[in-house]
Image: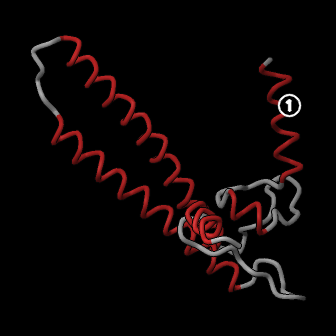
Amino acid sequence: MPDNAKKAESITLRGFEPYQMKEGEEYMNEAQQEHFKGLLQTWKTELMEEVDRTVSHMKDEAANFPDPADRASQEEEFSLELRTRDRERKLIKKIDSTMELIENDDYGYCDTCGVEIGIRRLEARPTATQCIDCKTLDEIKEKQVGG
């Protein structure tokens, strides 16, 4: 694999190497749980650091511009940042509940049908609670109901 592709892959996984399954390995064993704990903890830490940067940025950049257009631009920028941070706050809660699932040995299994979600799907979306089939069905139902 070229260095650039390898670098891009590890950035996507927040610095983690994809889990390498061993032949005959049991699903969601201790090694896999540790892999996902580390992945989730790193993700949470990055989100928390981003919150700190936002607070610092807003303190440093807050100015009372005399021009209404400049003031409006700054308020819009801050509003977008706050909306993003609110979404990340919700994601942090989801990460915490996912960490609880790992602690209770319930992580990695579909809430709807109980089958294994799969290592690769969990690496792509560590907070997933449904297998791809159940998630797809939910999305189809949502489109039919929502229009």
Q: Percent from the top left, x then y, of residue 51? A: 34, 50
Residue at far front of view: 2
Q: Percent from the top left, x then y, of residue 137? A: 88, 40
Left or right, residue 81 beside residue 10:
left
* Residue at 65% over, 57% down: 127
Query: Residue at label 1?
Result: 141
Left or right, residue 43 beside residue 82:
right
Residue 110 position by quadrant: bottom right
Q: Percent from the top left, x then y, of residue 34? A: 62, 81
Compared with 129, 13 (above or below) is below
Residue 23 position by quadrant: bottom right
Residue 10 position by quadrant: bottom right
Quadrant showing the C terminus = top right
* Residue at 79% over, 53% down: 130
Q: Residues within 10 Å of mark 1 (few under 14, many from 20)?
A: few
* Residue at 16% over, 33% down: 62
Left or right, residue 25 beside residue 106:
right
* Residue at 57% over, 54% down: 94
